Amino acid sequence: MYSIIVHGGVGRIPPEKEEATIAGVRSAVLAGQSVLKGGGSSMDAVELAISVMEDDPTFNAGTGSVLTFDGEVEMDAAMAHGPTLSFGAVTGIRNIRHPIALARMVMEKTDHVLLQGAGAQEFARMMGIPAHNPVTEERRMQWRDYRERFLRGDAGDWPKLRALMREHPEFLHGTVGAVAIDEQGEVVAGTSTGGVFLKLLGRVGDTPLPGAGTYATGFGGASSTGIGEGMMRTLITKTACDFMRLGLDAQGAASGAVSMVDNTIGTQAGIIVVDCRGSVGFANNTGRLAHAYVTSEMDEPRVGI
């Protein structure tokens, strides 16, 4: 028995991006399935699936990450191993190709949970990770446009910037994540993101924080996407895992976690979930949630946006 589900973020997907988004999440879930089908670990499957999306400039992770207000890229990533409650994460990382791989190294090669900024960058150098420029010309052009609008007064402060995000949900699109269970019954969750457009330099989102953007226990795992500040305030992935501990299946946990966000702070959210029995679930309160999943009982993955 194995299962894997991936997401490519919530928010508006322009019509011209739909085909690429569908192809991207499909390629990612098939890559993860190839690991699981061959008897590989959920850790390897999640890392590979996310790496595929980090290499796809369609998504806001790795190459193609959005830019900060100052025109930089600062990426976050995390991996969680359910059976041991192990967690590894990086935040504010620059100039590497696969932040998810570095997050896994934090978990497996250090006694720490989270490395940030210059320290994470130095750790990447120590691990022999080569430099890579994740900025694409498309993201640079979008950054110029959005920043000019901001400076004109279209969004004069952070609450107004949030209003601009609600008006243009494409700001949110692209965070990627995966959750899998392997034939040994081990659940792993991972998430990778470039954050949100025009974020302040140094802003930390939900992705690298245990229980916010990423979490896994012996009962299941979850990866979320949306406005990170809301995910941090509600600990949406921890909530989903707690629901599974109390007996809900993956779909019930996903739906319950998003309902909890709706009933408390009402922020935009999406989540993918796998439980310890191999069931998958997903839920969102936005227009779109790019996702794909496959289990050992399925002939082909199911893809949706």
Image: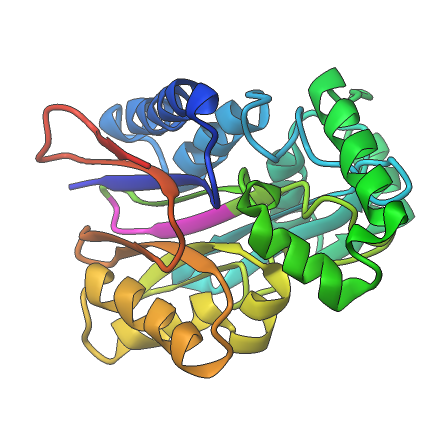
Instruction: Decide if residue 218 is on the left or right side of residue 64.
Output: left
- Residue 188: say if magenta: yes
Instruction: Decide if residue 175 is on the left or right side of residue 162.
Output: left
Residue 76 location (% of width, % of height): 68, 47
Q: Quadrant of the C terminus?
A: top left
Residue 147 location (% of width, % of height): 83, 40
- Residue 181: say if magenta: no
Q: Is residue 188 visible?
A: yes
Report which quarter residue 229 is drawn in: bottom right
Q: In this rendering, is residue 133 above or below 177?
A: above
Q: Check the image and tell me how it is coloured.
A: rainbow
Instruction: Decide if residue 278 is on the left or right side of residue 214.
Output: left
**Rendered residue at 27%/66% (across/down):** 255
Q: Is residue 205 visible?
A: no
Residue 163 location (% of width, % of height): 65, 60
The count of marks equals 0
**Rendered residue at 81%/42% (across/down):** 149
Instruction: Decide if residue 67 is on the left or right side of residue 186.
Output: right
Q: In this rendering, is residue 156 above or below 44?
A: below
**Rendered residue at 78%/46% (across/down):** 198
Q: In this rendering, is residue 293 above or below 219?
A: above
Q: Which of the two residues, 278 or 142, is positioned nearer the viewer here?
A: 142
Q: Which of the two residues, 49 or 42, is positioned nearer the viewer here?
A: 49
Residue 218 location (% of width, % of height): 33, 65
**Rendered residue at 48%/65% (across/down):** 85
Q: Quadrant of the N terminus?
A: top left
Q: From which residue to which does the magenta span run? A: 184-190
